[in-house]
Image: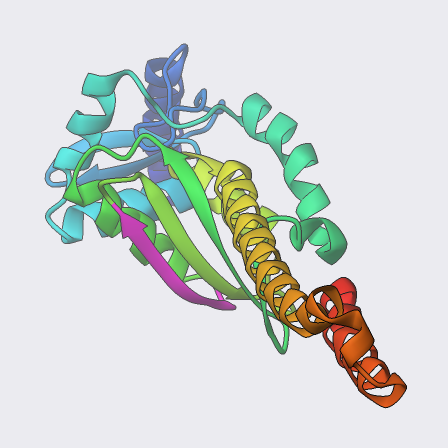
Amino acid sequence: MNQAVLTSARAQQAEIDQAAAGRTCHHCGASLPQMPVRASIEGEALDFCCGGCAAAAQVIAEGGLCAYYDKRDATGLPALQDAEIARLREQWQALDDRDFLAAFATDLGGGIWRTLVAVEGIHCGACVWLIERHLLSIPGVRVAAVNYATRRVLLEWDDNRVHLGALLEALARIGYKPAPNVRHANEAQQRRASRLALLRTLVAWLAMMQVMMLAWPSYVDPQGLSAAERAIFHWASLSITLPTLLF
């Protein structure tokens, strides 16, 4: 009896292997392995490259969001292939260095960081739900909020528990191509620099006006000022000018 069951199981697996030849995973789009995982999703037998993809598809189905796959396929943006993810992983590993990370992410203290990530492939509310739920399931992620209008994800995480590179790879694994929003960070830095330059100009202008007022008596009636009065005006001008130069 056991031999018959074993033979039947092997036959079923052989049928699955043959059907999987040249096909891709229903969830991530990767090529199916020689022995794919078959799972029933909403009454339909589907093949997956691994148990993780099968579980993700089951979660999507339970959430009533199977239309996510239709939206994804209609746009021609399937999940990233393993080779592309491996290539991008090399770039994302640089984000493990906090000195590099500080170039475009905000250090909130205590190992907590915040940044914006631009994401390709967000088409509908199903995508928003999937991204947020998937990221929030990762230990160390505190905030994962998708802005559907800008196609950006606000991330806040504990870098002592998980690195940003791992979060970007997690996004890629479910079909979304992420890019740390370096441009946004550069624009923010430029705005801060512009505000600081404007403030310095304003302070310098006000200081100039005050120094001119203090110097005015020396121009109008230089002989009418005593040495003590001239010294007072000079020191007062210096007390205004020096802090302005240091600022």
**Residue at 86% in and 89% down:** 228
- Judging from the image, the colouring scheme is rainbow
Q: Is residue 102 magenta?
A: no
Q: Position of residue 47 (x, y in %)?
A: 31, 29
Q: Is 172 situated above or below 232?
A: above
Relative to 146, say whether 45 is above or below.
above
Quarter of the picture containing the C terminus is bottom right
Q: Is residue 53 above or below residue 103?
A: above
- Quarter of the image for residue 233 reads bottom right
Name the magenta segment's main secondary structure.
Answer: strand
Q: In this rendered view, identify the residue nearer to me: 130 or 10.
A: 130
**Residue found farthest to the top:** 22
Q: Residue furthest bottom?
A: 228
Answer whether residue 51 is visible to the viewer in this image: no
- Image quadrant where one finds the N terminus: top left
| Side of 79 relative to 108 (left or right) | left
Is residue 107 found left or right of 53 in the rendered image? right
Residue at image location 25% in from the left, 30% down from the top: 46
Q: Residue at x 58, y 22 (%)?
A: 83
Q: Which residues are magenta?
A: 139-147
Q: Is residue 230 left or right of residue 76?
A: right
Between 175 and 45, the one nearer to me in the picture: 175
Residue 224 x %, y %: 77, 79
Query: Can residue 113 be seen by looking at this rendering?
Result: yes
Residue in the foreground of this view, choosing between 46 and 6: 46
